[in-house]
Amino acid sequence: MYRYGSSTKQNGFRSNKPLTNEEIAHYAPSVLATEPHDSRGERYGFIPTINVLDGLRKEGFEPFEVRQTKVKDQSKREHTKHLVRMRHPNALALDASAEVPEIILVNSHDGSSSYQLLSGFFRFVCSNGLIAGDVCDDIRIRHQGNIIDNVIEGSYRVLDNIELANNRIGLYKDVKLDREEQLAFADAAIDLRWDRNEETLKAPVQASSLISVRRTSDYAADAWTTLNVVQENLIKGGLRSVSDKGRRGRTREVGGVNENVKLNRAVWTLMDHLVKHKTGAM
């Protein structure tokens, strides 16, 4: 199993088998909220996320990862924004370096989010969950009307979008990048997460750190592998860093729902632009 966050205040959990409701309740209790937050009015159409998940389970989808936003106001912990990554259990990778498609569901019960469906992929070799950038349109469903049926219908539309992303992945795997191109991509990715010091234009990490590989299978220089390496280093953290004041440390994991989704999509979109510029395709 793959866990995200500290041992005492985890805000996410990943398993190699479908999650039970008990596991979901422990790591992302807002998924099982039975009523909306007190701030919602009478016109707010409340449908528990767990009801939607049960509907998707009947269609063959199972949750493998959950996470929720950390909140300072603990009264919102049971209703805050949450994310669920789902896939068919029979969607297995052919080898350890392959990836499988996932449907990503984002929602909240405090008014901070509508139902949102995104296209994603899970890469087994690094236990890494990616989110397709602007290759695929996300699907948003307001808290009104027949939400469960609308989300299920939207999930199948996401699966159609995944075919587009799969084609894009195939192109990325065929595009080779030299080291200068990899460094240029990593340098641009730095700006997606950190503000550079205005005086020195320095970031807490160097581009070379973002393309440093964590396993021998990632030494390939194609665009898809480079995207995965940079995305993993950005999201999971653990890189040596130096602050503006010269303090040395390690970069932190990007665990929040908003930050994780935004950065995940932005890195993919960045690579999409690089490949488009290099090949003239798409």
Image: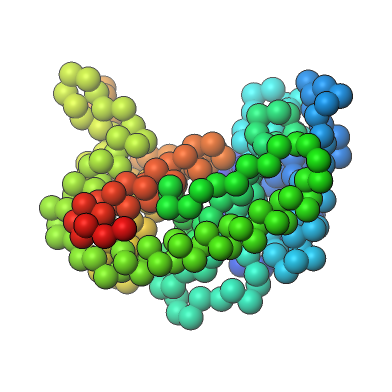
| Percent of width and height locating residue 179 | 15, 57
Work out whether residue 164 or residue 172 is closer to the camera in this orientation and state it. 164
Residue 104 x/y as whole percent: 60, 53
Residue at the image point whose x is 58% and y is 57% from the top: 158
What residue is drawn where x is 68% and y is 42%? 141
User: x%, y% of residue 277?
Assistant: 21, 52
The answer to which of 128 and 215 lies nearer the viewer is 128
Q: Is residue 110 visible?
A: yes
Residue at (64%, 61%) from the top-left corner?
A: 156
Horizontal side of 243 relative to 20 (left or right) equals left
Quarter-of-image position of residue 102: bottom right
Question: Extreme bottom residue here?
Answer: 94
Q: The C terminus is located in which quarter?
A: bottom left
Residue nearer the viewer, 167 or 193: 167
Q: In this image, 114 relative to 235: left or right? A: right
Colour convention = rainbow
Could you tell whether 199 is left or right of 15 in the image? left
* In the rendered image, the vertical position of residue 37 relative to residue 268, given as above or below: above
Q: Nearer the viewer, residue 192 or 271?
A: 271
Give the quadrant of the N terminus: bottom right
Q: Residue at x 30, y 42 (%)?
A: 189
Observer able to see residue 65: no
Residue 154 percent coordinates (x, y): 66, 53
